[in-house]
Amino acid sequence: MKKLGKPRDHSLFLKTFRTYLQYINSGLYFRREHIIGLENVPIDGTPLVVVSNHQNCLNDPLCVCLKLTDRRMNFLARANVFKNPLFNKVLRAMGLLPAYRMSHEGFGAITNNQSTLDAAGKALTDGETVMLYPEADHQDKHWLGNFKIGYLRIAFDAAERMEFKQDVMILPSCNHYSNYFHARTDMLIKFAEPISLMPYYEQYKEHPRETMTQINTLVRNTIQQMMLHVEDLEHYDQIDFLRETEFGKRYAIKNGFKPNFLPSRLRSDQRLVDTLQKAYEKHPAEMEEVYKDVAELSDEYKRLGIRDWLFVHNAGIGALLLRGLGLLILLPLFIASIIPTGLLFLIPKIFLKRLIKDQMFVSSFNVGASAFISVPLCLIIPVIAIWIMYGFWWALGYFAAFPVMFILAWNYMRIFQKFKGTCAYVARRNREDINKLRKIRTSIHNRLNKLIEHN
């Protein structure tokens, strides 16, 4: 019998690098992080397969890895990110394993997966954790794709290696972001109750394919219930627009949710999406007209460079002057903050459009560029130089002030963008096109409220 092994110890490199990434991820990139159901994660040493939806590329496994610090994590990631020899060493040291896909690496490369499956199976028999994404690729919207059953093959293969004497567990999880692309936003990870495979062992021996299909359905349904899943892809853009604008905020408040608290807003958005989809089933003609107007409203917002919140506050010249005065007063503070942190903003702008064609890699690229380029240049090297020239306490002061300066600079630029939008709105506030949009917006809200109340 293959006995349950002992998880490998975390190397000094892995501990140090993970602490460094935690500083970038939690200290700089995300504003707030919400971890729900952490008590559902089995203790270290339990063979565990974590499966999740996949919507934000490398940020998805990174956020989980930085939260489950007591477990030895192993991740399956697309093979093409391992092409660079240096990245290959770093990624493998962090626990990543290459997954070869026919659609990307070709049929001939599929055989390379056997070594990955063997490594993942060994990790489980050693009591470690394997995390993967059964959709086999990331999505570009709040939607859960079909699940492949490869993760269950790995899990049952590990159980068979241990002669079905040890339990292997599946932990469904989901991730959710208040915004996929911007820094200083909120992220959320949910863990459901783990699913023990031991009760399925005898059934699996007789009917392996049917058993895995049954469990796969259970796991996928569990994840879908935890996340924001928009089934109506035909009207996805309109539904997403409604939930992100004032309509979604008012819906949350009306139904007792907190629109600015991500876990609560997720529950509100789930209910809103479900309500809109049911309204479409009952009133397809009326909802089709509403969605047509929503699409027009969204397109006009983009064309004019304005946002929905401007119609709520209906800003005038007085508010515009106050915002401008505030920005002018804070300008010296912004300059003092942007000088040491500027590369964190500049480097992504220089390389992002050239290197990233898939928009869902934007945030992953920003975190990666910060970790390997911007933070070393803006923080690590200056701290060392200040330490040498002025002493430890000055270096420590710079280190402590750095995230504060980054946050100040980021918020100033965000406020400036709002100021520009306010200028565009005020300049057109009494024009025919803005009045037309105001009427369309009011009509959409009134019609939707009536259709929703009828459900």
Image (cartoon, rainbow, N blue to C red):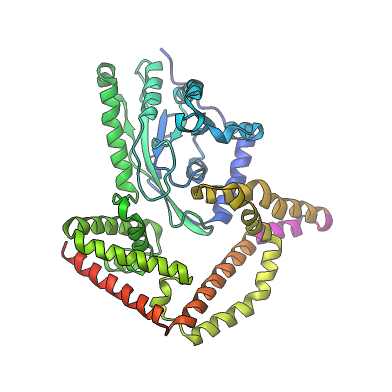
Q: Which residues are magenta?
A: 389-402
Image quadrant where one finds the C terminus? bottom left
Q: Is residue 367 above or below residue 46?
A: below
Tell me residue 68's x, y (percent): 48, 40
Quadrant of residue 17 in the image? top right
Tell me residue 63's x, y (percent): 50, 45
Q: Is residue 135 above or below residue 294?
A: above
Quadrant of residue 171 in the image? top left
Query: Is residue 127 in sight in this rendering?
Result: yes
The residue positioned farthest toward the top in the image shown: 1
Is 74 displayed left or right of 170 in the figure?
right
Tell me residue 442's x, y (percent): 30, 75
Quadrant of residue 172 in the image? top left
- Front-most of residues 423 and 341: 423
The residue positioned farthest toward the front in the image shown: 432
The residue positioned farthest toward the right in the image shown: 389
Q: Is residue 157 above or below residue 369?
A: above
Image quadrant where one finds the N terminus? top left
Q: Is residue 393 magenta?
A: yes
Task: Please give the count of numbered marks on the rendered protein.
Answer: 0
Q: Is residue 52 above or below residue 7?
A: below
Prevalent SS, magenta region: helix
Is 454 displayed left or right of 238 in the figure?
left
Query: Is residue 199 in sight in this rendering?
Result: no
Is 127 displayed left or right of 290 in the figure?
right
- Front-most of residues 233 and 127: 233
